[in-house]
Image (cartoon, grey):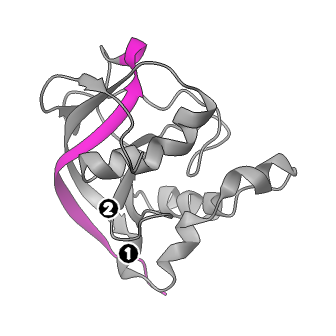
Amino acid sequence: MAITLAPFAGIVWRILDARLAHDPCAAARAPEGRFHHSGQRALYASLTAAGAGVAIARYVRENPGPRVIAPLHVDLARVRDLRAEPAPERASVVWQELRASGAPSPTWALSDAARDLGTQAMLYPSRSRPDLTHIVVFDWIAGLTVRPAGPARPWHPGPDG
């Protein structure tokens, strides 16, 4: 299957530890995540504020603490949209348990292939709410291709997050 890349520009939402509010365009601090490993950079966000809450719900339970939500403007030329491909749910597996067993996350094959093609980001459906969309950005320039779109504000989990 040929992978199609297309431009994507718009506002996305990112929930961060409140201590990181000063740098909302920074890469994820965890050494491994759904779409990054082995020193790779990744910035995770959602197309809606509600989606950001859903995406971070598991991590908030594991690591409670003050959080902020920051709107970011992304302007990227080469984005892979997994929602438009066969079996988009393959991006939404619960990767943590697989990784804990010592196996590599199967989602890394998707992101590694995208990175190899020069993809700047991927859009993918939420695992628990497929009507919501998340984005992972691999290749960005803070302040240029990804920049704050407004101030970060305090965030508290709601019924979905």
Residue 104 percent across, percent down from the top left: 77, 55
Residue type at mark 2 is: Val
Q: Of 51 and 125, which appears nearest the observer? A: 51
Is residue 117 shown above or below 74?
Answer: below
The numbered disc on residue 83 is 1
Dividing the picture into quadrants, the one containing residue 85 is: bottom left
Residue type at mark 1 is: Arg
30 displayed left or right of 141: right
Structural crowding at the residue carrying mark 1, measured as other residues with C-alpha within 10 Å and reported as few (<14), some (14–19) or many (≥20): some
The numbered disc on residue 79 is 2
* Residue interval drawn in magenta: 1-20
Q: Secondary structure at mark 2?
A: strand
**Total numbered badges shown on the rendered structure:** 2
Residue 49 percent across, percent down from the top left: 26, 45
Dividing the picture into quadrants, the one containing residue 158 is: top left
Q: Is residue 18 magenta?
A: yes
Q: CA distance from mark 1 to mark 2?
A: 12 Å
Is residue 79 shown above or below 52?
Answer: below
124 displayed left or right of 7: right
Dividing the picture into quadrants, the one containing residue 119 is: bottom left
Q: Residue at x 47, y 86 (%)?
A: 86
Q: Secondary structure at mark 1?
A: helix
Furthest toward the front, the residue is 159
